[in-house]
Image: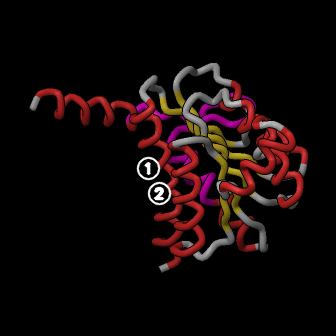
């Protein structure tokens, strides 16, 4: 029983210490960061822009899940680049580092919002996709973990960092952050 309780205590500790920074590295606090994310997303989607989610592995599952929630429940244009034919085609023809960069180059429009999710914040394909989104004039929000100096953490206008080296804790935190954003958007429309 002690290990179960300890697991959830440790998870709560990660939730309680999420750091949110702007692109200039300045801390904005969790509540303020969530509010800024909500403002960016609602402003962009109200003007016809879309939200694009990217991630690998468990983060890809979060990306797909949240694209559906933002679309179906939130009524916003949202998508994730996790189609197996797309990933294997681009990976085979251009290399795995380009699996997000290439579709973002073709499908992202200025003013879209990219939410890049990576537990390590070091995945080359996520970094390349994020850079492409910025070059296309998209807003970028990042969700990362593990080490505080990961490359993804400094790329976005808003950067959510889960301070843990545990994949499970980082992934659960990223999922909870996404749900918090979309659930608050939905609640405020009611």
List the residue tagged with mark 2. Answer: 179
Q: Residue furthest left?
A: 1
101 lies above or below 84: above
149 left or right, relative to 175: right
Counting from the top left corner in percent of width and height, residue 80 is at 66, 58
Which span of residues is magenta-colored?
A: 16-38
Q: Out of 91 and 141, give the one closest to the viewer.
A: 91
Q: Is residue 179 magenta?
A: no
Asked where in the image residue 103 lies, by quadrant, the reply is: bottom right
Give the spatial CA distance, label 2 vs label 1: 5 Å
60 lies above or below 19: below
177 left or right, relative to 37: left
Q: Out of 72 and 49, give the one closest to the viewer.
A: 72
Q: Residue at x 77, y 44 (%)?
A: 99
Q: Please give the label number shown on residue 97.
A: none
Counting from the top left corner in percent of width and height, residue 17 is at 43, 31
184 lies above or below 76: above
Q: Residues within 10 Å of mark 1 (few under 14, many from 20)?
A: few
Q: Is residue 17 magenta?
A: yes
Counting from the top left corner in percent of width and height, residue 29 is at 53, 38
22 lies above or below 47: above
Q: Residue furthest bottom?
A: 190
Q: Residue at x 52, y 67 (%)?
A: 69
List the residue tagged with mark 1. Answer: 176
Q: Residue at x 57, y 58 (%)?
A: 64
Asked where in the image residue 121 lies, by quadrant, the reply is: top right
- Helix or strand or loop: what does disc 1 sit on? helix
Q: Out of 171 and 16, give the one closest to the viewer.
A: 171
Picture mark count: 2
Q: In which quadrant will I find the N terminus?
A: top left
Counting from the top left corner in percent of width and height, residue 39 is at 65, 60
Q: Residues within 10 Å of mark 2 (few under 14, many from 20)?
A: some
């Amino acid at each position: 029983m002690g290990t179960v309780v300890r697991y959830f205590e440790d998870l709560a500790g990660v939730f309680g210490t999420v750091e949110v920074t702007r692109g200039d590295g300045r801390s904005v606090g969790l509540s303020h960061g969530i509010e800024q994310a909500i403002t960016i997303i609602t402003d962009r989607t109200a003007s016809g822009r879309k939200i694009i989610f990217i991630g690998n592995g468990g983060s890809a599952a979060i990306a797909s899940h949240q694209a559906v929630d933002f679309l179906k429940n939130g009524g916003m244009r949202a998508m994730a680049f996790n189609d197996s034919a797309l990933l294997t085609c681009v990976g085979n023809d251009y290399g795995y580092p380009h699996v997000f960069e290439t579709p973002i180059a073709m499908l992202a429009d200025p003013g879209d919002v990219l939410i890049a999710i990576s537990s390590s914040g070091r995945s080359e394909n996520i970094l390349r996709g994020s850079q492409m989104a910025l070059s296309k004039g998209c807003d970028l929000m990042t969700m990362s973990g593990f080490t505080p100096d990961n490359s993804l953490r400094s790329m976005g206008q808003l950067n959510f960092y889960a301070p843990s080296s545990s994949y499970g804790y980082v992934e659960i935190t990223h999922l909870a952050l996404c749900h918090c954003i979309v659930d608050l958007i939905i609640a405020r429309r009611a």
